[in-house]
Amino acid sequence: MSASKPPIHLLWGEDAFLLREAALAIIGPEVAAREIDGGEWQGGETGDLATPSLFGERRALLVTDGRALPDDALRELEAYLSSPDPQAILVVCATVPERGKAPAPLVKLVEPVGTVREIKIARKDLPSWLSTRAKARQADLAPDGAAALVDTLGEDPAALEQALGQLSAAFPGQRLTRELVARQFRGLGEQHIWDLCDKAFGKDLEGSMRSLSTLLESRADALMLLGGLASRMRDLLKVKSLPERMPPAELAKAAGLRFDWQARRYRDQARRFSLEELVDLHARIAETDRALKSGAADDVVLPVLIAAIAGEPARAGV
């Protein structure tokens, strides 16, 4: 980035966890940033950035889920970016579907005055990323242990980070090998089904269809796949029924989820549907279950269900 540019960043990519981690690295631990979800923009959020601090400390605003910013928020950002404070840090994160592009309206706003950067980790780089995270935790993660975590739990960085923490706590002071990964996470190979659920309920139709095709080609049990979708649906219904502004830790506890990051992700997914749509989709899952148990072909009925979940709503304005 040119030295003349203020610290303004648009970070985009497929994984919200990686985006937030990259944003916090830019802001730094010494700066107390205000963090807001794009969908919860109230107006006036850039005011703190534009107002000089009484004590001279740096100010920062972190906007997550930038694709959910309303039009009035974009106008406010445009006004601020016409004359930004050269010391104030603004980071906007935009999570996109698989193979998606950076949101054009945000690129148009940020690119002339700041930095637009894609944040991603290729699957082949995940073991080395995990090794770096392990060193930060002062944990001894063996190369085969890092590879085993990815093989067992899939490519979700948030899940891998959480698993690394569990593994370190379960075997303190030990070298974390493939054997210990297998012992700790035996039976969690369903992560690939979680990936299908994330893509489907994240409205990534193309990605979810590819994920489903891969699972079916690997002879995954159709009823097991449907069970994963049904479980996620139940979780989203619970999240949808709880207050929108409930903190992630409280939301996870109230909805019976294991981790805070699940609460954040499931709330984001639940926002993409009305309660009526979730109830209707729950009924469709039950119909698909009956069809499969009656002998219907899994490569026929499951794509239809995934299209119903991941496709655009039938009625406008949803």
Image (cartoon, rainbow, N blue to C red):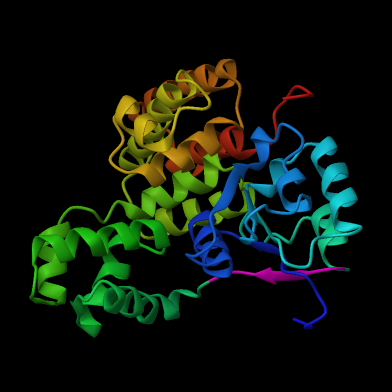
Give the image quarter of residue 96: bottom right
Q: Which residue lies most toward the front here?
A: 54
Against 271, residue 153 (above or below) is below
Assign the N terminus to one quadrant of the image.
bottom right
Report the side of 161 relative to 63 (left or right): left
Q: Position of residue 95 (x, y in %)?
A: 62, 54
Against 267, residue 193 (above or below) is below
Q: Count every numbered label the image shows and give the total.
A: 0
Report the side of 239 relative to 16 (left or right): left
Work out whether residue 129 or residue 80 is closer to the camera in this orientation and state it. Answer: 80
Q: Is residue 219 visible?
A: no
Against 315, residue 23 (above or below) is below
Q: Position of residue 270 (x, y in %)?
A: 53, 31
Give the image quarter of residue 125: bottom left
Q: Is residue 246 magenta?
A: no
Q: Is residue 118 magenta?
A: yes
Who's the residue at 72% across and 41% down the image? 45
Q: Is residue 274 visible?
A: yes
Give the image quarter of residue 123: bottom left
Q: Position of residue 49 (x, y in %)?
A: 73, 52
Q: Position of residue 67 (x, y in %)?
A: 71, 46
Report the side of 218 relative to 258 (left or right): right
Who's the residue at 58% across and 21% down the image? 277
Work out whether residue 55 or residue 14 is closer to the camera in this orientation and state it. Answer: 55
The residues colored magenta run 113-120
Assign the C terminus to one quadrant of the image.
top right
Who's the residue at 52% across and 27% down the image? 245
Work out whether residue 147 or residue 44 is closer to the camera in this orientation and state it. Answer: 44
Report the side of 136 relative to 108 (left or right): left
Who's the residue at 78% across and 67% down the image? 86
